[in-house]
Amino acid sequence: MSIDSLLEQLERDARAEAATLVSAAEQRAREIVSRADTATRQRRAEALGRLEQAGRLAVACQTAAAARRFRASRLLERAEVLDRIFAEAEGDLRTASADRYQRLLPALMRATLRFLEGVPAAIHCRPEITAAVEQLRAERVDLLVRPSADSAAGILGESADGTVIVDNTLPALLRRRRAELAVAVAARLEAA
C-alpha cells in the first residue's frame, strides 16, 4: 500500500472516528438536555404544587378566620338580644301585679325564712300582698312586715342588723336563673 493510500485510509478512519465521537457527543448532549428538560418540568410542577398548596392553605386560613369572626359577631348579637330580653323581663317582673305571683308566696316565704330563723327580721313587700305575707309569717313575732310601694314584686327578707338579706323578689329570681333560662331562650331564638 502506498503512503497516499495509507494517508487516505487514516484520514477516512479519523473522519469515521470523529463522526462516531461527534455522534456520541451529540447523543450525550441530547440526553443531558432531555434530563435537564425533565428536571425543569419536574421542578416547575413541584413549585406549582407548592404554590397551589400554599394558596389552598391561605384560603383555608382566611375562611377559618372569617368563620371565627362570623361566630363571634353572632355570639355578640345573641348576647345583646338576650340582654334586651332579660332587661325587659326584669322590668315587667318588677311591677308584676300580685295576682301573677300570689301562688308563689308560700314557697317564697319558706325560702326566705329559712335564712332568717332565730333572728329578728323584716319582710319588705308591696302593699297589695301585705295581708298574705302577714298570714304566712305564722307565729314569728320577731318578724315585721314592711309594705312599700317601691318594693319589687315578690319579697325581700332582711335581718334586723342588716347582715342577712334574702332577695326573693321576682327580678332577683330571674337574675339567679338567667344562665339556665338564657340557654332555653337562645335555643328558641335559633329555632325561629
Image (tube, rainbow, N blue to C red):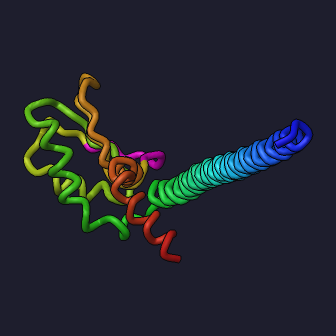
Reply above or below: 187 against 146.
Answer: below
Please name whichever residue, 45 or 159, is drawn nearer the observer in this view of the structure: 45
- Please, which residue is most extreme toward the front here? 1
Task: Give the image location of residue 160, x and y in percent.
Answer: 24, 27
Please name whichever residue, 121 or 154, is drawn nearer the observer in this view of the structure: 154
Residue 47 makes an appearance in the image: no
- Please report the residue visible at 70 percent of the width from the left and 49 percent of the height from the top: 31
Reply above or below: 17 against 93.
Answer: above
Q: Residue 6's image quarter?
A: top right
- Please report the residue visible at 23 percent of the width from the left and 54 percent of the height from the top: 108
Please name whichever residue, 104 or 130, is drawn nearer the observer in this view of the structure: 104
Q: Is residue 13 left or right of residue 78?
A: right
Task: Give the image location of residue 10, x and y in percent.
Answer: 82, 40
- Please report the residue visible at 33 percent of the width from the left and 65 percent of the height from the top: 101
Assess whether residue 149 is covered by the magenta stretch. yes
Assign the N terminus to one quadrant of the image.
top right
Q: Is residue 106 left or right of residue 155?
A: left
Please name whichever residue, 114 or 34, is drawn nearer the observer in this view of the structure: 34
Residue 114 makes an appearance in the image: yes
Task: Give the image location of residue 171, x and y in percent.
Answer: 41, 51
Assess whether residue 98 is covered by the magenta stretch. no
Reply above or below: 7 against 164.
Answer: below
Residue span colored magenta: 145-151
Task: Give the image location of residue 103, x and y in percent.
Answer: 25, 68
- Please report the residue visible at 77 percent of the width from the left and 43 percent of the height from the top: 17
